[in-house]
Amino acid sequence: MVLLHVLFEHAVGYALLALKEVEEISLLQPQVEESVLNLGKFHNIVRLVAFCPFASSQVALENANAVSEGVVHEDLRLLLETHLPSKKKKVLLGVGDPKIGAAIQEELGYNCQTGGVIAEILRGVRLHFHNLVKGLTDLSACKAQLGLGHSYSRAKVKFNVNRVDNMIIQSISLLDQLDKDINTFSMRVREWYGYHFPELVKIINDNATYCRLAQFIGNRRELNEEKLEKLEELTMDGAKAKAILDASRSSMGMDISAIDLINIESFSSRVVSLSEYRQSLHTYLRSKMSQVAPSLSALIGEAVGARLIAHAGSLTNLAKYPASTVQILGAEKALFRALKTRGNTPKYGLIFHSTFIGRAAAKNKGRISRYLANKCSIASRIDCFSEVPTSVFGEKLREQVEERLSFYETGEIPRKNLDVMKEAMVQETSEKPKKKKKQKPQEVPQENGMEDPSIPFSKPKKKKSFSKEELMSSDLEETAGSTSLPKRKKSSPKEETVNDPEEAGHRSGSKKKRKFSKEEPVSSGPEEAAGKSSSKKKKKFHKASQED
């Protein structure tokens, strides 16, 4: 008969419970479900087999993370292997989470079950857990749950300070809100100050500049040629400053009191401060995007890239999106309206604000938006999953989009993606510091001692000394009629040092081997090279003897 056990995870430890011999059909009856609320009746169904408390809060947090990720912790493994029967086929383990159930079944081999009867039993165990475990009170169990919940949530919220996209989302949202507010407030200043000086609206178009001029001019009757230099500094144009001075002398505006001017100046100063803060916030957003998503910002710009991240929720979510989703991100209403009315779906969403789509022709806007969304998807994945942030890939992807634009206009064939990515990889590796390559030849002889086959200066000296002595010894051995040349060359102590450059001999080309064989009998150390050199010496010796 199959024995049903239930695993219960609590903030204080693991509990393993066994069900008494009760049919599953009877457990699903409403009377039995109501009896779960009664402790006396619940004891007749369930008994506690084992309880494994956590040693500390840190251990509890580790086990909670393991359970949430579907990983079998060592404490859980020890509990199950110790207290469950050895015959695994006769055991059925009830688990609340399907992930941990699948992990237990895969690693330990126990059949696991979730839902149905198990959910009702776990509901009763959760209700009466402090009564099932001796020495555990309801208050201490609640405190353990609260502490573990706080630490678990704190661990989930932890992030890398240098690469956090939450600040980008807040910055771009605040930037958009500031743009709306500055525009609204500037229009209010234009209307308010326009009663006194209406000609200024036609001369100055920029909102921030208009607010600065309203704050500086005040009463137009007090404006004279002494303030012309300051006007030129504010407008950055001498013609406009002269036009403002001329318009103030022949203005049709109404007179205004000093109190009204004070209110207008104070309000315009607030608008000027908001515009200055908007510029500083844009600088902060640019620096943050260069840290978090350098490739995406290099490809499509900081503002559009930040809007894509904000709309997706995070950089990780944006990296998970396919290119087709990135293309229409921000145009969801138009998409669902088109699907409902069976009309044309939108070609682009937030990426319309990039310069590429505006530069493309009307017939190529859909093509370039699809191509740009593809490159944005690649750039976001590179930024999300790369350990070291770099803008090399973003610049190369931008070059590809530029080439595709020129292809649509002139027909010039762009480069292949494989070639461009290879160039990006080479450029990324070349940007790394080259100090390591210079240090290697200096450090190797200190570590390896006297000899190093990679140093070319020690080889010619050895070649000269070995070639003379070996030629002399070979001449003497030929006169004596000896035939054991390779064995004697092995036993010579001077040639043992030549065996070290075997690795260098394999790396060197065929030309170098030919030169070494002419200069010295043993170039790379093996016996075959020695045999070849000795045969050549024999031929030379026979020719010399015939001439004599």
Image: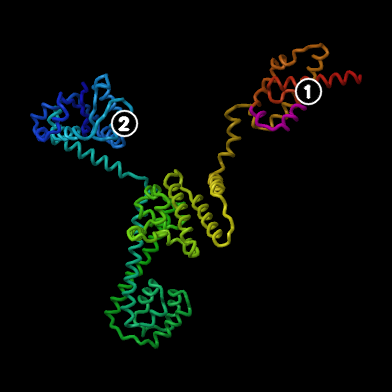
Q: Quadrant of residue 137?
A: top left
Q: Identify which residue is drawn at 53% across, 57% down.
A: 404
Please name which of the two marks, 2 or 1, marks the residue nearer to the observer. 2
The circle on residue 468 is 1
Q: Is residue 510 magenta?
A: yes
Mark nearer the N terminus (2 vs 1): 2
Farthest residue toward the front? 342
- Residue 307 showing in the rendered view: yes
Residue 100 x %, y % = 28, 33
Asked if 7 appears above or below 352 in the picture, the reply is: above
Q: Of helix, strand and loop, which mostly describes the magenta segment?
A: helix
Mark 2 neighbour density, 10 Å: few (under 14) some (14–19) many (20 or more): some
> For the residue labelled by badge 1, is the local secondary structure a helix, a strand or a loop?
helix
Circle 2: residue type: Ala
Residue 451 x %, y % = 64, 27
The answer to the question of whether label 2 and label 1 lie on touching residues, with beta carbons closer than 8 A, is no
* Quadrant of the drawing holding the C terminus: top right
Q: Identify which residue is drawn at 51% across, 52% down.
A: 397
Asked if 228 appears above or below 121 in the picture, the reply is: below
548 or 436, which lies in front? 548
Circle 1: residue type: Lys
126 or 491, which lies in front? 126
> For the residue labelled by badge 2, is the local secondary structure a helix, a strand or a loop?
helix
Asked if 36 appears above or below 192 in the picture, the reply is: above
Residue 232 x %, y % = 45, 76
Please name the residue that numbered disc 2 is placed on: 103
Mark 1 neighbour density, 10 Å: few (under 14) some (14–19) many (20 or more): few
Q: Is residue 315 magenta?
A: no
Q: Which residues are magenta?
A: 503-518
